[in-house]
């Protein structure tokens, strides 16, 4: 059993490590072809991560990426492709920011204000994802199509509401517009990083708690068992008494609720307002991180740290004369190669299991004859 367990660890690491090495080779070839020494570029990227400010910003990026990946992974476990995380978190962040910046919130205790803001974001995200889930269970509409279309609707709705005549105000001294600024009592203080002027988001603890809750749900609850069973085989789940339609709707609601949290670290820890420059595209990044981390809470954490570090080092490359798009190329190659690598590892694992079964069956008769 120990040997099999160790082999499982090796096989589990083979795909992401192989994909990362392949991406490094591809980027090294591109850098060499364009006249940029690969080793010097690698040293510059690694050296930039040693700077306190870059390290702190990498952790902040990883926090939001991780929440996005968990939201996507919940759907993946059910064989549901929630492509709408991007629209869900942006709409949730905008409406939660409008609530948090309302004047009546100033009279409430700080803990209650933060809880209401986070709860509102989760509710909006769940409702928006629930629309796609409802369409799937009642009309058979593919969640891929509906969530993509809901992304467009969310973008238009945010643009409509983010107007000085509605929920937004003009930011003083700029052409930017955003929701009213969240006052001190509604903010989440960060953690100081030694030597850095940037704090680490205080809601990094929320991201860790979400990861633990995700693991607990999947491995220690009946709902998590039903979710994984339905994802593996709907017919088998139905035979065991699982209501598949209810599981689909519940999974989409849960995925949307997690998506609503994606914008909270940035909103309550740095921006304090939802404006035109609020980060976008985090939902699609979450898909890549969920794939790289194999939907596992620990694997996605390492993938989020990798993505956050690559994003921050791209700025250093741009200053040193190396096109920062090389980082985007590396991320794209990682995503493409990891899908292929996981399939190759899966097939190799099946061959090993078949070989083990064959050996066991082949030695069983011999053992019986010895005992006789």
Image: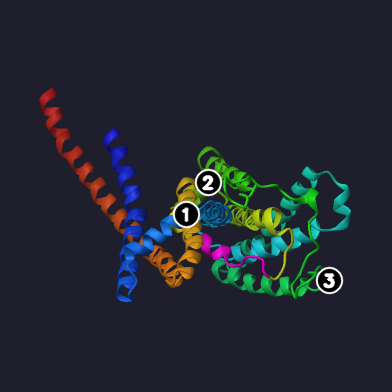
Horizontal side, residue 41 vs residue 324: left or right: left
How far apart are the alpha carbons under marks 3 and 1? 42 Å
Residue at 24 percent across and 47 percent down: it is: 352
Residue at 45 percent across and 49 percent down: it is: 299
Which residue position holds label 2?
Answer: 226
Front residue of 256/158: it is 158
Q: Determine whether 278 is above or below 191 in the image.
A: below
In the picture, the quarter occupied by the N terminus is: top left
The answer to the question of whether label 3 and label 1 lie on touching residues, with beta carbons closer than 8 A, is: no
Q: Which mark is residue 49?
A: 1
Position in image of residue 298 (x %, y %): 47, 45
Horizontal side, residue 10 vs residue 247: left or right: left
Front residue of 74/187: it is 187
| Magenta highlight range | 277-286
* Badge 3 or badge 1: first in the primary sequence: 1
Which residue position holds label 3?
Answer: 166
Q: Which mark is residue 272?
A: none
Position in image of residue 351 (x %, y %): 24, 51
Q: Secondary structure at mark 2?
A: helix
Closest to the camera, between mark 3 and mark 1, is: 1
Q: Secondary structure at mark 3?
A: loop
Q: Is residue 282 magenta?
A: yes
How far apart are the alpha carbons under marks 3 and 2? 43 Å
Q: Report the colour scheme.
A: rainbow
* Total numbered circles: 3
Dividing the picture into quadrants, the one containing residue 273 is bottom right
Whether residue 253 is visible to the viewer of this picture, yes or no, is yes
* Badge 2 or badge 1: first in the primary sequence: 1
Position in image of residue 87 (x %, y %): 64, 67
Horizontal side, residue 355 vs residue 37: left or right: left
In the picture, the quarter occupied by the C terminus is: top left
Q: Is residue 227 magenta?
A: no
């Amino acid at each position: 059993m120990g040997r099999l367990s160790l082999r499982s660890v090796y096989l589990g690491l083979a795909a992401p490590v192989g994909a990362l090495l392949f991406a490094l080779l591809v980027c090294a070839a591109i850098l060499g072809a364009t006249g940029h020494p690969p080793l010097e570029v690698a040293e510059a990227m690694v050296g930039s991560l040693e700077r306190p400010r870059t390290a702190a910003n990498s952790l902040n990026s990883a926090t939001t990426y991780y929440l996005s990946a968990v939201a996507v992974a919940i759907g993946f476990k059910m064989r549901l492709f929630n492509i709408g995380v991007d629209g869900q978190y942006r709409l949730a962040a905008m409406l939660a920011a409008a609530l948090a910046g309302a004047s009546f919130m100033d009279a409430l205790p700080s803990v209650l204000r933060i809880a209401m803001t986070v709860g509102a974001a989760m509710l909006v995200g769940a409702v928006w994802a629930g629309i796609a889930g409802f369409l799937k269970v009642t009309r058979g509409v593919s969640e891929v199509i509906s969530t993509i279309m809901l992304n467009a609707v969310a973008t238009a709705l945010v643009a409509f509401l983010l107007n000085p005549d509605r929920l937004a105000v003009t930011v003083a001294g700029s052409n930017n517009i955003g929701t009213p600024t969240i006052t001190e009592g509604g903010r989440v203080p960060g953690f100081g990083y030694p030597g850095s002027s940037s704090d680490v988001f205080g809601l990094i603890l929320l991201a860790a708690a979400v990861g633990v809750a995700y693991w607990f749900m999947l491995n220690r609850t009946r709902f998590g068992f039903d979710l994984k069973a339905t994802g593996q085989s709907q017919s088998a789940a139905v035979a065991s008494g699982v209501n598949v339609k209810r599981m689909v709707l519940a999974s989409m609601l849960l995925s949307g609720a997690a998506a609503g949290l994606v914008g909270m670290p940035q909103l309550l820890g740095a921006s304090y307002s939802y404006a035109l420059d609020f980060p976008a595209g985090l939902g699609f990044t979450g898909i890549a991180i969920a794939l790289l981390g194999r939907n596992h809470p620990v694997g996605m954490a390492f993938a989020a740290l990798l993505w956050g570090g690559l994003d921050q080092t791209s700025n250093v490359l741009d200053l040193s004369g190396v096109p920062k798009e090389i980082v985007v190329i590396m991320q794209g190659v990682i995503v493409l190669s990891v899908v292929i690598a996981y399939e190759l590892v899966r097939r190799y694992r099946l061959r090993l299991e078949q070989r083990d079964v064959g050996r066991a069956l082949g030695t069983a008769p011999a053992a019986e004859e010895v005992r006789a």
